[in-house]
């Protein structure tokens, strides 16, 4: 069976499609940076999971390397907003590749029901921010007993 080859850097350089995608991604990033400078500096959105229990919404946001003092969390109505900044650390040597994000971040989520904004709690452990947003008494699910008629 023959393998695909690409004639470029050597007489028979092996074709690596993933490397080409990485190169394309890097080039597109540089193009966006030079063309739309202010848009490239916009806040990024961290990965998050939202789950619902009987009495609260749990929002888990991945924020590795972010200090607790660099995060703010606010609830307005039924919208949760978590924002902050991950500062770039000083490096020794030449940085060859960067895939981790730095700079301002913002995560917004509209929760499906009414919430008790006075009792929201947040903890940061092992790079995961967990925000527990209790449901208001009006929006909690109640089981209705069915009686025989």
Image: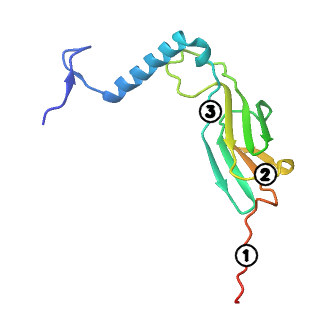
Q: Residue at x 73, y 65 (%)?
A: 141
Q: Is 69 drawn above or below residue 5 in the view shown?
A: below
Reading the image, the residue beneath label 2 is 115
Quadrant the N terminus occupies: top left
Q: Which residue is located at x 66 percent, y 42 percent?
A: 61
Mark nearest the camera among 1 and 2 is 1
Residue occupying the point 23% across, 14% down: 10
Residue at the limit of the structure toward the front, as seen here: 149
Query: Which residue lies at the image location 73% right of the left edge and 37% below the top edge?
Result: 81
Q: How many marks?
A: 3
Mark 2 and mark 3 lie on one chain; the one further toward the N terminus is 3
Is 5 drawn above or below residue 75 in the view shown?
above
**Image location (x, y in percent) of residue 111:** 70, 48
Q: Which residue is mark 3?
A: 45
Can residue 127 be seen in the rendering of this structure? Answer: no
Give me the C-alpha separation between circle 2 and circle 3: 23 Å
Out of 103 and 115, give the one closest to the viewer: 115
| Residue 105 point in image, percent of width and height | 67, 29
Instruction: Say the numbered circle drawn on residue 58.
Output: none
Q: Which image quadrant for residue 146?
A: bottom right
Farthest residue to the bottom: give it.
149
Are circles 2 and 3 on residues that touch, CB within 8 Å?
no
Q: Earlier in the sequence, mark 3 or mark 1?
A: 3
Q: Read off the residue under disc 1.
A: 144
């Amino acid at each position: 069976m023959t393998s695909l080859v690409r004639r470029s850097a050597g007489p028979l350089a092996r074709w690596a499609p993933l490397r080409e995608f990485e190169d394309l991604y890097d080039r597109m990033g540089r193009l966006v940076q030079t063309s739309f400078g202010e848009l490239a500096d916009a806040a990024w959105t961290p990965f998050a999971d939202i789950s619902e229990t009987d009495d609260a919404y749990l929002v888990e946001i991945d924020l590795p390397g972010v200090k607790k003092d660099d995060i703010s969390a606010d609830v307005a109505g039924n919208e949760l907003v978590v924002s902050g900044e991950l500062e770039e650390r000083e490096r020794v040597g030449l940085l060859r590749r960067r895939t981790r994000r730095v700079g301002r971040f913002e995560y917004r989520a509209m929760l499906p029901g009414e919430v008790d904004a006075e009792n929201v709690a947040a903890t940061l452990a092992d790079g995961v921010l967990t925000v527990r947003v209790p449901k208001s008494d009006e929006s909690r699910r109640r089981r209705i007993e069915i009686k025989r008629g």
